[in-house]
């Protein structure tokens, strides 16, 4: 006889089905609550740039524009003004040291030189005449003293004879006194003549020294004027390339005016302009490189110019190795300038999002990939390719790195 089996009310299938329904209901409630507390915006994923945060080597560098320039540049300036009489060479010509480039004329300077030369010859004549007069005065003194000596000896002899005659009472005392006065007068005259001649000689020596000093200064001035006259012939200071000559025949030139430029082609350097933001981080010794004919050409910062113009400052970079064939003046290339040593870091590609957020937050995609939410992050250093992520992201997470300008203040983006 068959036995009736009573059917169980709660089976495992019913229990699992009920649990699934409750879980779905809870998810629906959570989704409804979440959507009511965070603003959302539907966007087209195809129009976004999505990047992956990944671990790698962060190489801190900036890309700047470098221009090849001669290692040394010499300016042609007018030492004296004038007008251009002849022009022998034009810009672009190769020159050797001493080659004549321009000839200027200055009639005023030429006339001044002639007048100063005449003045010098007059000084020379005066000096020679003064020296001659000094010698003549010496001869005259000798002759005068010789005559006085002769007269003094005669007067002395006469005085001594009269003294004996007076002692023998042959002549009166008056004759003795007369001869004595004559002798004294001649001796005084000799002393005066010697003193007068010494004064004249000292005066002549002083005049000679003054004339010699004036003549020396005149010669120096004349030499300078001669050099200025010779500088009217503008010549190349060094061998190289006459890159420009900015004057024409007949043009009036002022003193100190720039006439042209010579480039010394014995070597080259790279002139680089850098944003003032990096001025505290640029110093001699930093290295960089640029690609030329498929090879990396190494450079090193040799000089930093502290002056900032229009938000930028200049840097000279030297070639670490011999200058490659084909490098020419004026060549402009992008230079990768290293600011630090490579380090391991979490990297996020650069993008337009930074202008909106300043790097303080980003939209991070969910695991399902159908939405993106705001998340605060911390960024560190930057190079043209990557940001260094210090906090807020994990390896492998996807981030919207394109511009956020069309998203407003939405917390969640739905795809």
Image (spheres, rainbow, N blue to C red):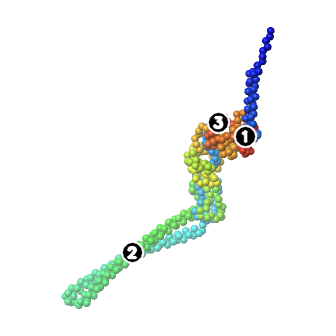
Residue 352, position as x, y percentages in the image:
70, 44
Q: Are marks 2 and 1 in contact (CB under 8 Å)?
A: no
According to the picture, the residue beneath numbered tag 1 turns out to be 37
**Quick check: 302 above or below 205?**
above
* Total marks in image: 3
Q: Secondary structure at mark 3?
A: loop
Answer with the quarter of the image where residue 251 lies: bottom right
Mark in the foreground, 2 or 1: 1
Is residue 232 visible in the rendered image? The answer is: no
Label 3 and label 2: CA atoms lie apart by 105 Å
According to the picture, the residue beneath numbered tag 3 turns out to be 394
Which label number is shown at residue 201? 2
Of callouts 3 and 1, which one flags the residue occurring earlier in the amino acid sequence?
1
Dot 1: few (<14), some (14–19), or many (≥20) neighbours within 10 Å? few
Of callouts 3 and 2, which one flags the residue occurring earlier in the amino acid sequence?
2
Identify the residue at image location x=28%, y=83%: 183
Label 3 and label 1: CA atoms lie apart by 26 Å
């Amino acid at each position: 006889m068959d036995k009736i089996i009573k059917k169980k009310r709660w089976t495992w299938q019913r229990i699992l089905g009920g649990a699934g329904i409750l879980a779905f209901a809870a998810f629906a409630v959570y989704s409804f609550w979440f959507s009511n507390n965070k603003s959302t915006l539907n966007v087209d994923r195809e129009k976004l740039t999505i990047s992956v945060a990944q671990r790698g080597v962060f190489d801190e560098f900036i890309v700047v524009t470098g221009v090849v320039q001669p290692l040394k540049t010499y300016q042609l300036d007018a030492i004296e003004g004038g007008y251009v009489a002849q022009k022998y060479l034009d810009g672009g010509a190769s020159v050797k040291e001493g080659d004549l480039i321009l000839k200027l004329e200055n009639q005023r300077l030429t006339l001044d030189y002639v007048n100063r030369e005449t003045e010098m010859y007059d000084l020379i004549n005066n000096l020679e005449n003064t020296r001659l007069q000094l010698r003549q005065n010496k001869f005259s003194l000798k002759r005068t003293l010789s005559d006085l000596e002769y007269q003094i000896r005669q007067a002395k002899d006469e005085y001594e004879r009269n003294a004996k005659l007076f002692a023998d009472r042959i002549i009166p005392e008056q004759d003795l006194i007369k001869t004595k006065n004559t002798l004294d007068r001649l001796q005084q005259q000799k002393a005066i003549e010697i003193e007068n001649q010494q004064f004249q000689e000292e005066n002549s020596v002083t005049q000679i020294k003054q004339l010699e000093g004036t003549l020396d200064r005149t010669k120096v001035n004349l030499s300078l004027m001669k050099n200025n006259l010779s500088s009217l012939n503008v010549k190349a200071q060094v061998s190289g390339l006459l890159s420009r000559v900015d004057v024409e025949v007949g043009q009036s030139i002022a003193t100190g005016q720039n006439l042209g430029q010579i480039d010394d082609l014995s070597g080259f350097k790279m002139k680089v302009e850098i944003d003032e933001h990096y001025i505290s981080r640029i110093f001699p010794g930093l290295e960089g490189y640029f690609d030329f004919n498929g090879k990396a050409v190494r450079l090193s910062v040799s000089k930093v110019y502290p002056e900032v113009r229009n938000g930028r400052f200049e840097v000279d970079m030297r070639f670490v190795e011999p200058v490659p064939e084909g490098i020419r003046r004026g060549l402009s290339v992008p230079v990768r300038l290293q600011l630090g040593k490579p380090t391991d870091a979490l990297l996020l590609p650069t993008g337009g999002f930074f202008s909106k957020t300043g790097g303080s937050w980003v939209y991070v995609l969910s695991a399902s990939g159908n939405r993106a939410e705001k998340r605060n992050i911390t960024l560190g250093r930057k190079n043209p390719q990557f940001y260094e992520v210090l906090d807020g992201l994990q390896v492998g997470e996807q981030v919207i790195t394109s511009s956020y300008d069309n998203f407003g203040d939405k917390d969640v983006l739905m795809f």
